Amino acid sequence: MFKRVGFSMLRLMSKHLLPLLVLSLSAHADPVSFSREVLPLLSDNCLSCHGQDAGHRKADLRLDTAEGAREVLKSGDFMARIVSTDPEEIMPPPKSHKPALKPEQVAMLKRWIAEGAKWGRHWSLEKPVKAKVEGHPVDFFVKARLAKEGRTLSPKAPEHTLRRRLSFDLTGLPPASDIQHLESSIEHLADSLLASPHFGERMAMWWLDAARYSDTDGFQSDASRTNWPWRDYVVESFNANKRFDQFTLEQFAGDLLPNATPEQKLATCFHRNHMTNGEGGRDKEESRIDYVIDRVNTTGTVWLGLTLGCTQCHSHKFDPISQHDYYSLNAFFNSIDEDGSAGTKAQPYFSYQSPYAKRAVEESQKLVDARKPVEAKAKADAEKPFSQWLTERQKEVKGGFKAWHVIHGAVESQEGSRLAQAKDGIVSASGPNPKQDDYRLISVLKLPRLTGLKLEVLPQNGVLSRGKDGEFILTDIKVQVRRKGSSQIRDILVKSAVADTKVEGKAREYGDVKGTLDDDPRNGWTTKGFPKDQPHTALYALAEPLELESDEELIFELRQRSTNGDANIASFRVSATDQPGPAVRELGPTPLEQLATGKVERERLLAQFLEDYTPYQLAKASLDRANAQLKEVQAAAGKLNVMVLTERKEPRVTNVLVRGVWDKKGDVVQRDVPAAIAPWPAGLARDRIGLAKWITSKDNPLTARVFVNHIWQMFFGAGLVRTPDDFGLQGQRPTHPELLDWLAVDFMENGWDVKKLIKLIVTSATYQQSSNRTDAADPQNLLLSRGPRFRLPAWMIRDAALTSAGLLNPALGGPPVRPHQPDGVWEEIFMGRFTYEPSQGAAQHRRTLYAFWRRSIAPTFLFDSAQRRVCEVAMTRTNTPLQALTLLNDETMMEASRALAKRMLAAKTEDRLPLLYRSVLTRLPTAKELAVLQRELDSALAHYRVHPEDARKLQTTPELAAHTLVASLVLNLDEAITHE
Amino acid sequence: MSESSLNTTRRYFLGQCTGVSVGAMALHSLAEQPEVPGLPSLPHFAPKAKRVIFLTHSGGPSQLELYDHKPGLMRLAGTELPESVRQGQRLTTMTANQKQLILPGLTQFSRCGKSGATISEWLPHLQGVADDLCFIKSMTTDQINHAPAMTQFLTGHQLPGRPSMGSWISYGLGSLNRNLPDYLVLISKMQRPSDQPLYDHYWGSGFLPSRYQGVKLRNSKDPVLYLTDPEGLPRHLRRGMLDGLAELNQMRFEKTHDPEITTRIRQYEMAYRMQSSVPELTDLSDEPDHVFDMYGPDSRRAGSYAANCILARRLAERGVRFIQLFHPDWDHHSRLPSWCTARCRDTDQPSAALIKDLKQRGLLDDTLVLWGGEFGRGVAGQGKWDSPEAGRDHHPRCFTMWMAGGGIKPGITYGATDDFSYNVAENPVHVRDLHATVMHLLGIDHERFTFRAQGLDFRLTGVEPTKVVKGILA
């Protein structure tokens, strides 16, 4: 499968491989293990019909409890049905699509029964115990397991590999390339990386995925929220090595703690990070119930490793959790003081001012300060060319000046109105008068360019339209270009519309001329209420000047598709201009027309001149963007509304929801936890504080195991339990159960000390092994006989590229930033409602953790990342051509390549390629590698020296262009994007 | 493409890469494979259709104005919808507080073709291909709001996170074209901001590997994100760079023996091929005028639904497995006649032309075409029922879809609604049944096609009872 489809789905394969491996080890002398052998088999084959879910139970038989199974085991019916050859009798039945049990499975069951059919519990529900170990606990268990197979650990990885591995794992960044040697021990290195503020950022990226954190609501309106101070709380908590039980408590119940600090209140945003739906027509109560359910499911996945979501509709088919249990958990979250609203009404809020925003304001202020004088200078520099231009124009317009040129061309209608154009350019309609019609004027433009169009609607026989009341309704206009003889038409973007009739613009009414720009037939331009025996004029300004090729035609389309129709224009004229700025934005004489009459309107003339003066436009656009950014971060530096938990005064009644449907209320339930997991700690109030304490109580067999497994997965690419979201019967068993238990117990005994746990893992020989494959056995590395080798998460690839290029802005916290992303991505999804402006200056090079996350369209440069719609803790790693294209052409990767190329060019010629390798891969190239790199560099140099115009297109010199290409090659190397 | 670039690759592996390791040879044989196979267990039986074109009309097109003719409503105009019909149907909060007064269909219908299908005058071109279409008037769904309804319509479940039908199918059946993704999505370019954004989870792969997610073909300089090399980087330099990259990656493979490296080399090659195959696909300049005439004037405007219909046919010709078009803005709560006719104008002629075009080229026999939206619209007027402002609210209990082509009985109408187009009167077809039927036509038994995630065996059709709609199969 690996090879066939080109991706690694660990979970797909290992589900099948693992039992084989386990079975091969189970010596027949040992008694059959109920939890390891019998229960998984019952779960896979029997429990969907004979489990605890009474709704789906067949023949009133339960095989998930000893009592339920006692009778059929005793009578022998159990085995008889399994080995039966009668299709009516055999279990599982053929229509379940489950194959009959294999002979070795049957034999195992027989042995189990012969041994007394001893019942037990699923492994993850038994409390973990710490076995006795010698030496490093991780190595002790891993080596013992390997020894059973006659294998040993792989040798230690090379030093530079180890430094990279450790640096990526603990900070998400590559090591600084200027350190040539690992001078200190792995312990010291681990300590210094754990002390780095980037450690918290690395852990936060994981936690944000699990928390489905996003900067927008999701769903229809996808409005922005300002919950990012919670993200900084997460970074701070990991950096301060906050005990994980305390971290849990604050996020579940920070608001309920006595003398809660602002940060503790902020922490509860965890349970508000779900999507919120503000769709019109949506019942708020249904939304609110969705949010409660999301919190319970997230709690189940992140802390307990249980698929609680299944129990929303029915009792769990496999795990001992009933539907009542599920809604009892819901009850803890059901009395939040919320009403299901979204957008800016998603109470409860906590008003909070972030200490991290000040830095961002200063950074943006500096950028504005730097760009202001550039703009001012550009304006001053424009004075001279402006006077020159003005002199020339004055000469030019002496004999009079006409800005607008009437368009002549072919006229046609869609529905049959007869159109004819007279010599003066006036188009009149006659003949059939359909209810609605589209008119088109097609012409070859003589102007050097087009900046805007003027539409005059002219009275005919004293009225403006052919309709009964003499009023016209123009619902939309289109400006298009067609190449003669070619099939393709392109739309030209019109930026603004003004008319001589000013009315209050309403979204769904006819009146305002702006309504003709949105392709919506429910609004548009009419001059009803104004004299209908007078001409009326509308001006349309193009977004950008349009230059037509000699074989291109301009199409101006008038759409008249109003609801009631019968409002087709009787007579109109269209004119074109090449004058920019005020000429197409303001009615009346244009600046040059005024000039022709001897009126020197200096401000309007300068405005028109600057419109076309590129050096000024560039400086101004650059300053405008910096100013916009400054305004944005200044707003973020004030008091922000962060969505948090607060309890309402009157608790809500919680019901079981029949089949999970929000308004089908069943039994009333009280706050409680599934008894099968752990008992409620004595003496605690039944509130969210109690719930958090139950989750992290020493009696809870799941939380510590699940957490340890998350950490293991982070460093090894796969957990000790390879289904991190499912520790239940349908999940996988741990590859090293005693190790998982030892680490879980040790973690709790050490006060849920996260850094200590991490340090323990990374100082093991198991962690430090080489990741090279020495043989074909164990492709999934279930035995941990080699180090982990897997592609880095996309966010680390971006952060690593910025770091190796020396571009990374290492600042911590603050309002989100917008890294480069191709134009138009948001616009397409929201049909123009949101536009994406990449961050300016140093803000562009912040870590990916701070990238603005729009829930309906995640940052495009991230692949295989969590979608942040619901909580996700499993890693997916695919290998696709789209990822290749991203890494080849993403603007950030190109910027990093250019920056690397500049650093190379600053070095001596012979040092350049080694410097590149050292910056990106933390090692020097081999002679063979150097030869390949040199060959590609030479051929690129040869090309760009002969074709400097190509280098200019890349805005570089030939040398820089060639080195950029080679830098991009190295950033794309498998080794550069892989955790080795 | 691109025999030339393929050869370059071959030359590279046979010529330049003379380290001739086993890895390199294996790589070469992979590059020779004509397609990416699907699951070995699929298809379960001989398929009737090889590929799907799904014309998705987002917003809830009104069955009452387009297909489901209820002349009897005229005499009930303005009267209150009887509770015996409504039977407690949930309303959105947009109309929950107003009287449910009957608004008869706002258009004329004709009986079309030999089959006599009822089709609105707003769809004159579809009237002309009536005998190729199979109408299902008894579609039904559980969801009343857009996002959950569309999510269920496309992924089988109302909450985001499950794979879409296209992902399931490309995962199961694999690809017939090695230069293009298996599942492509085309969205009409509209001018006005849409009230219902098209989320990328509509074509997401959910818990399936992301290689199976729909790839959106954009109407811009980059039809696929990041496809275009920067200006000033000529093709031969990119080729050289990729050769160097492959060579260095190959060295790494020989050291680490990680098969992911081999896959990565292959994916960079595929990326390179896509850089020519995709622009070649999206450039319609080689289509003759009569094709544009057939699809209508809008087809000359890049990004329009009509242009996307031509693209859909080109994709079908190239063996792309699942082609999904989205045309938004069918959510006609007000001013229904002007608004709805505008969307009909965008889509009528091109939809009909696509059927004719596929038929002429012999592609309709093994291409399954679907037309439909996430739900229908209610018989009661929204707003003042007899004013031109009136529209209709969402309605989940019944809506109309049509299907055509591979394995579908042409020229029939299946299922029916009551006199109010409110409840399904006969042969209900749940969205799940539609999914099962599409799979069936592709040779897949929906009950046996599962994927294990979060400890459960998931399938597109979920756990509720589901049936293949036998009555529409040819």
Image (tube, coloured by chain):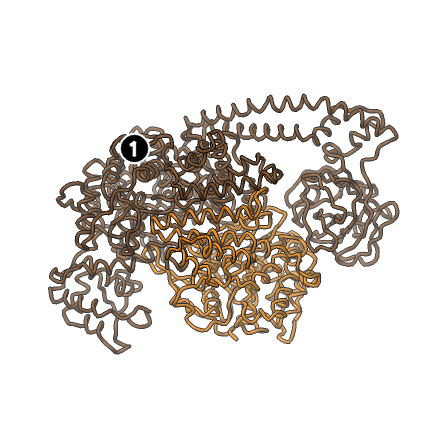
Q: In the rendered view, tell whether residue A329 sits above or below residue B60.
A: above
Taking depth in this image into account, of A337 and B445 the one nearest to the observer is B445
Q: Quadrant of residue A66?
A: bottom left
Q: Which residue is mark 1?
A: A182
Residue A757 image point, x, y percent: 24, 38
Neighbourhood count class around disc 1 (C-alpha, 10 Å): few under 14, some 14–19, many 20 upward = few
Residue A880 image point, x, y percent: 45, 52
* Residue A261 as seen in the image, left or right of residue B132: left
Q: Secondary structure at mark 1?
A: loop
* Numbered disc total: 1
Q: Which residue: 74% across, 46% down?
A: A549
Q: Look at the image and give the colour of chain B.
A: orange
Chain at numbered mark 1: A
Three-letter residue code for mark 1:
Leu
Taking depth in this image into account, of B375 and A926 the one nearest to the observer is A926
Regarding residue B418, the answer to whether it shows in the image is no
* Residue A341 as seen in the image, left or right of residue A188: right
Residue A470 image point, x, y percent: 80, 49
Q: Which residue: 30% across, 39% down?
A: A162
Residue A834 image point, x, y percent: 55, 41
Q: In the rendered view, tell whether residue A458 sits above or below residue A816.
A: below
Regarding residue A436, the answer to whether it shows in the image is yes
Q: Quadrant of residue B308?
A: bottom right
Q: Quadrant of residue A176?
A: top left
Q: Quick one: which chain is brown?
A: A
Query: What quarter of the picture does the N terminus of chain B occupy?
Result: bottom right
